[in-house]
Image (cartoon, helix red, strand yellow):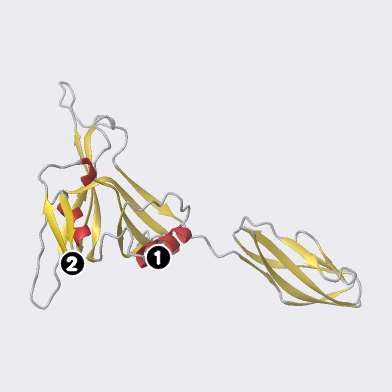
Amino acid sequence: MSVAGMVTPCRTETFQNLQLNAGAFLVDFDYSTYPDATSLRTALATALQNDEYVLGATRGGGSFVVTADTREPDVDGKRYSFRGGRFVDSVDAYLTGTLVEIRPSMLAKVMATGDVSNSGQKTTLTMHTAIKDEDYIDSLIWVGDMSDGGLILIDLKNALNTNGVTLTFTDKGEGTIPFEFHAHQDAVEDYDNAPFTVNFLDAVATPGISIYPKTNELKVGSTLTLTKTVSPDSATVTYSSDATAKATVTSGGVVSGVAVGTATITASITVGGSTYSDSVFVRVVSA
């Protein structure tokens, strides 16, 4: 795009594709049944309210990092690099952040091999020295906002914090614990895909319909075409008239004056079992 001599990729659409805010980290939250951002937001709000799945509050956001270890074989006669001549040996994916909320269950996960035991009002954390299968977090998720109302969700498989534990405490401040969770494959035979997914979930607009002009005067024998705004766009619109002896309407929203009098024209859609409608007034006068 070129504006006043300046070449820039900034467009109107740019501001619909921005990632906003720090998001949240969740542990083993099953998002597979939520097909869009609207339903997922509702589920996330419930989880946060019930203090379920949440890793903890963070400070300073976080980062998603993917590194690829590639190599280019050195072969006699090869004089330059070429497309198709490089191979991927391994891919590593990480989610990082800094926790300011410190709870036993969360700290045990950051320890990677932490154990939690309770005795009365005392909770004790210990750390075993061998990594067990249950130490891996099956699914560590980060969810963030998109500027168009959607969500971006990063799912790290078999996550394990590999950066140790550092609790930093300070005068007139809060303790912090940085973390770096590393994704792992399910098994040594898994070669095809790296152990993470990045998911974009679109927002679902609130269903509804509007038709206009709201007030119309029409001569007998003449027609007018109503304008409509529908969400979702794919919804089927049904038109009706409460006084077909005075004015009729076609399936395309074309109103015809039949005889002097008044009529109310209604447009309806049905989405998810619910009906949404809007109406306009039509006065039919003599030609």
Q: Residue 135 got which mark?
A: none
Q: Position of residue 281 (x, y in %)?
A: 77, 76
Say few, some or many: other residues with alpha carbon within 10 Å of mark 1 (under 14 / 14 to 19 / 20 or more).
few
Q: Position of residue 192 (x, y in %)?
A: 31, 33
Could you tell me if the residues under marks 2 and 1 are in contact, i.e. CB atoms within 8 Å? no
Q: Residue at x 44, y 55 (%)?
A: 201
- Nearer to me, 144 or 185: 185
Q: Nearer the viewer, mark 2 or mark 1?
A: 2
- Nearer to me, 69 or 196: 196
Q: Is residue 204 left or right of residue 165?
A: right
Q: Position of residue 208 (x, y in %)?
A: 62, 66
Q: Position of residue 204 (x, y in %)?
A: 51, 60
Q: Earlier in the sequence, mark 2 or mark 1?
A: 1
Where is 182 relative to 45, above or below? above
Say few, some or many: other residues with alpha carbon within 10 Å of mark 2 (under 14 / 14 to 19 / 20 or more).
few
Q: Is residue 34 left or right of residue 67?
A: right
Q: Residue at x 15, y 42 (%)?
A: 131
* Amino acid bearing label 2: Gln
Disc 1 is placed on an element classified as helix
Residue furthest front in the image? 120
Q: Quadrant of the C terminus?
A: bottom right
Disc 2 is placed on an element classified as loop
Q: Is residue 173 left or right of residue 227?
A: left
* Amino acid bearing label 1: Ala
Q: Which residue is mark 2?
A: 121
